[in-house]
Image (cartoon, coloured by chain):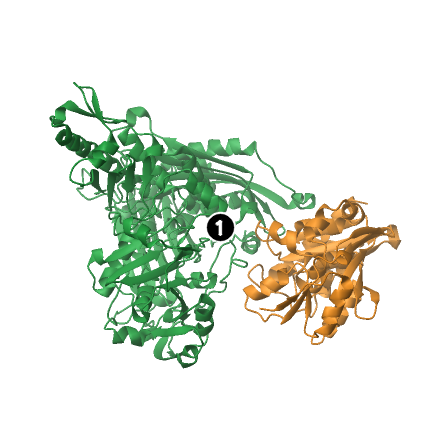
Amino acid sequence: MTAVDRDARATGWAATADLEAEPRERVAGRLRYVIDTELPGMAFGAIVRSRVAAGRLTGIDASEAERVPGVFRVVSGADVAAAGLAGARFGSLGEQPILPTERVTYVGEPVAIVVADTAATARRAAALVGIAVTPAPAVLTPDDALAEGAPIVREGRDDNVLTRWARSHGDLDGARSRSARIFRARFSSPAAQQASLEPHVCLAEWRDGRLEVWSTSQSPSRATEDLAKVFGLERDAVAVRVPPLGGGYGGKNQTKLEPLVAFAARISGRPVKVVNARSDEFVTVTKHAAAVEIESGIDADGGFTFRTAIIRWSAGAYAFSSVAVARAGGLAVLGPYRVPAASVESVMAWTNLPPAGSFRGLGVSQAAWAGEQQVDEIARAIGANPVDFRRANLVRSGERLWTGERVADAHWVECLDAAVAGLEAARSHRNRGPAAPFASRALRRGTGVAVAMKHTITPSRSEAEVAVLPDGRVEVRTSAVDMGQGVEVVLARIAAQALWLPVERIVVARPDTARTPYDMTTSSSRATFAVGSAVEAAARDLIDRSIEAASVALEVPPDRLTWTSDGVRERSMDLTVSLAELAAHGSGAEVAGRATFVNEPDRDAETGEPVSSSHWHQGAVALDASVDAETGVVRIEALAGAAWAGRVVNEPGARLQNEGNLIFGLGPALAEALEFPDGAPAVADLLDYRLPTIRDVPWALQTATLEMDDAAAGDGHPERHGLGESLIPAVAPALGTAVAAATGACVRRLPISPERVLTALDDA
Amino acid sequence: MPSLARPASLDEALGALRAEPAARPVAGGVGLLLRAAFGESLPDHVVAVGRLPELRSIEPERDGVRIGAAVTLAELARSQIVRVRAPLLAAAAEAAANPGVRTTATLGGNLLDRPGASDLVATALALDAEVVSADERAEATHTLRSLLETRAANADHPPRLLLVAIVVPRADRWGFERLTTRGAGDRPAATVAMSFSGSGERSTVAAWATWIADRPVPLVKAGRAVLDGAPDAALRAAVDEDLDGLAMADDLRATAAYRRRVLPVLVRRAFEAARARG
C-alpha cells in the first residue's frame, strides 16, 4: 500500500512518462490500482446486502454490529433519509437511491454499510446486521415480468417495460408473400459476469465541502456528474480520479459504489474505502440475459425477402445501460445484410435480479448469437455454402441496411474473406494437443463463420487538452480510462503524430475530473476514435496557440512563424523558441490547445433521418471445432478473426485487441453462464464460474486488422475505428455454426456446453 | 487464524499432534485455502508436515514405488521413477488441477482430504495402493481402500494418524480418463482410472471413478463388462448397477444425468487405452 502524497494530489495526478512502462508494470503486478491508494485516517466499508429478491424493508438492526470493537458506524437508509437525501437518485434513468429506505428489489442490493477500522472488522460486523424484510412476489425472467398482472419491480410504474425500441422498414406483408421459404427460430443466452481481475473499488474523502473520489470507473466524468447531482454540489466541487484499471469489460461503465461510499465518508467523518469481494461482484453487475425470436424469408435466388426479430431482455432491478443495450442489440440482430423489409422490436424488462450493465459487446453478442446462427441454418437448408451465402447478401458501401439507412463505409465482405483466409493460415499451426486417441472415432469436425456489426454511441462527446509542460514535454489530458486496452499509448501516438514530436516527449495524464476535461465514457470502442479525434484537434490547436505565444514573445507576426519538432521557428531569422522556453515565457498562463469532438450522426441523403451510428464496428470470425459425439465436449482447433480498423494507431495494441476479442468471446460461447435460481446467483466465485483460461485457447490463432487504402484516406470516413468489440459478437455464432456443420445438431441456448450438445445431438 | 506448529522431524510432528488433540496435519495447504475461501470452519491448530524429510522421498519398492505423502503432484508428474514404475499415477498427477495447484498440492492431501474429489484417489485405488501411516505408537500399512472405508465409517471421529507414504505396485496396463467440461485446468465432471493384469480368462480389472459422488466409486460390474467385451448397452447397464443407490454429484460442472451418461464412455476409453498398452 502506498500513502498518497498530498502534495502530489495538489499538483496533479500521476501522469505517465514512460509509455512502454505501463504494460510492463501491469504484467509484473507492480502497477498501482485504486485498491493500493490509502489516505490518512482512512476507514473501511463493508456492504450489507439484501438476501431476498423483493420485499418491503421494515427494519435494519445494527445493534450487534455496532458493538463490535473497531466499528465506527453502521449506515442505513434511515441515515440517508435523516440527511435529506432519501429522494436523491442517480444512474442512467435517475432511479437509483444511495440506499433503499422502503423496498428491496434484488438479492445483493445494498441496504446498509458498516464503517470500521479494518476491512476484516467491517466484514465481520456486516454479517451481524439484521435485515427485516416482508417478502413480496418477485419476477425473475422477462417473460414473467412482461406477463399480464406481473408484480411491478419499479414502484410507481404501470408495468415492467424499461424500454421498448422498435424499428421497421419496407413492405413486410408483400415480402412475406414473395418468399420462397420462411425460417423461424428462437435463441437465448444467459446472464454472465464481466469478471475483471480487479473488482469494483471506491475510496471517498470530503475535504472542505469538496468530494474527492478514487474509483474503478470507466466513466469518471459521468461519476462526477452523478455525485454532484446526488449531493447537490457544483460539478467542480467533485473530483473523480481513476488510476489504470485491472480490466473493465463494460462492468465498470456506470456509477455504482461511488454515491454510497461518499455518503458513508460524509456521515462517518473520515475517508472510506470499499473493496468488493469476488462474491459482491456477482451481484454488482451482470450481462443482460436475452431471448430472441427471429424469422427470415428468402426468395428463389437465395436473397433475403424480409427479416423480423423480437428480443426480450432482462435488465435486472436498475437500468445501468439497458436503454443502450436494447437499441444496440435491436440494430444488430438482423445483421449487415441486404434486407428489403424488416422489423425489430427490442423490449427491455425490469426484473428482480442484480442489475445488468454493459458487457463487452453491448447486447450485440446476444443478438448475433441468434441472427448469425439463423443465417447459417438458412444457407445449409438451401444447400448453399455459408460463406458464399453471406458474401452474396452482405451490404457493400453505399447500400442500405435493414433500417433503410445507407452505409457509407462497409467492409464486412473484406472482413469475412480475411477471416476465412486467416483460418486457412491458422490451420497450418494447428496442434491438436494430447487428445485421447480413443476418443477420435467419436470426433466430428466442422467449420463455422459469422460476422459482427456493432454501433458506437452517436452522438457522444469527448474533450481534450494538450499542454506544454515547463520541461518542454507535452501533456495530453483527457478523461479516457486505461484498463489494459492501451488507450494511453494510442493517445500519445496520436498527439505525437499531430505535433511532429517523438512519442517520448508526450506524457498522458490520468483521469482526474478536477483537471482532465469531460469525456462521456471509455466504452463502446470509442476512445481511439472519439478521444483520439479530440486529442488530434487539441494538438492542432496547440500549434496555433504556440505560434500565438511565440508571436508575442518574439514580437513578430504569426505568419512568419512555423511549428517544428524543436519548437516554434521564425523563418527569416532562423530563430527557434523551444517549447520549454515558450512555457516559461509570459504571464504564467499555460500554453495549451483545447478541442471538443462530437460524432453527430450524418443524415441519410434521401430520408433525412439521422443514421444509427457514426460508423460501424465490423468484423468476422472463422473457426474449426471438434465435437466429441459421445461426451458432447467441444474444442476449438483453429480460430481466426478479421476486424476493420480504418487506420491502425498502435499495431501491437491492435493485434492484442483482436486476440483479446476472440478469447473473451470464447467464454460465453463455451462455458460462462450466470443463472439465478430463486433470485440468488448460483455461483459467486471464480472457482466455479466458468471463465475460459489459456487452455481453452487454440494454438492456431490468427487475426487480421484491415486498413483503408491511402487513396481512401480523407474522404470523410472515420480513419480510426476502435477495435475493442469488433469480433466478440461473432465468436459464439461461429462456434454454434461449426458444431452444426460437424454434427447437424443446433444448440440454441448459450453456452454450448457438453450437456447441451448431447441433447441437441439426441434431437437432431 | 489457526495456530501453526512446524516440527523438524516425523517424531516431532507426531509429538505435536499428540499434544494437541484438535491439531490437524497440513502439507500443501490447498484444502485449507479452499476452506478459507468458502468460509468453512478451519482447524484451530495445524501441524506443518510438508517439509518433513520422511514424507518427501520417492524410492523403488518391490516392483513398484514408495512415495512420501508430502511429495507434490508436480514432483510426482516429473519423477522418472514414478513415470517408469507407476505411469498411471504420473499421468493422473500431470492432468490434475492446474500448474499452480500441482506445485503445492501433495499426494497425501489428495488421498485423505476430499477422497471423492481427487483424480489421484481413483488412480491409487485402481492400482490397489497401500498406505503407510504413523501414530504415536508405530507405523502401520493398510490398503488405501480399507483406510478410506474406515475413515468414511468413522467420519465423526476419524482415526488420528499421519500419512507417511503410499506404496504403489507396478501396473503396466492402465487407462485414465478425466473429463472436464471446459478446457481449463478445471475440476472434472468425472474421472475414471483403471488397471488390469493377467491375460485371457485370468485377467482382472480394477476401475474406480471419482468426482461423481462424495466418495470414490468402484466400477466392479462395469470393469468386468468391458473386460468381457460387452456391447455398449450391456456396459451401460453394468455402470447403472455400479451406481445403483448412489447419490450422484449434481453441480455447476455437470448434472448427475450427464455424469451417468458419460461414465460408460470413459470406462470404455480407459479400457481401450489400457489394452493398447499391453
Task: Tell me residue B191's x, y (percent).
Answer: 68, 56
State the residue in front, A660 or A566: A566
The residue depicted at 67 percent of the width and 45 percent of the height is A436
User: Label 1 marks which chain's residue?
Assistant: A
Report the chain shown in green.
A
Answer whether residue A678 is visible to the viewer in this image. Answer: no
Q: Which chain is orange?
A: B
Frontmost residue, B102 versus A155: B102
Helix, strand or loop under label 1: helix
- For label 1, the residue is A667
**Label 1 Cα neighbours within 10 Å, binned few <14 / some 14-19 / many ≥20:** many
Q: Is residue A434 visible?
A: yes
Residue A398 falls left or right of residue A199: left
Q: Which residue lies furthest to the top in this view?
A: A572
Figure check: B217 above or below B88:
below
- Depth check: give the residue in front, A738 or B53: B53
For image coordinates 71% across by 48% down, the residue present is B77
Residue A645 position (above or below residue A523): above
Q: What quarter of the picture does the C terminus of chain B occupy?
A: top right
Q: Quadrant of the N terminus of chain B?
A: bottom right
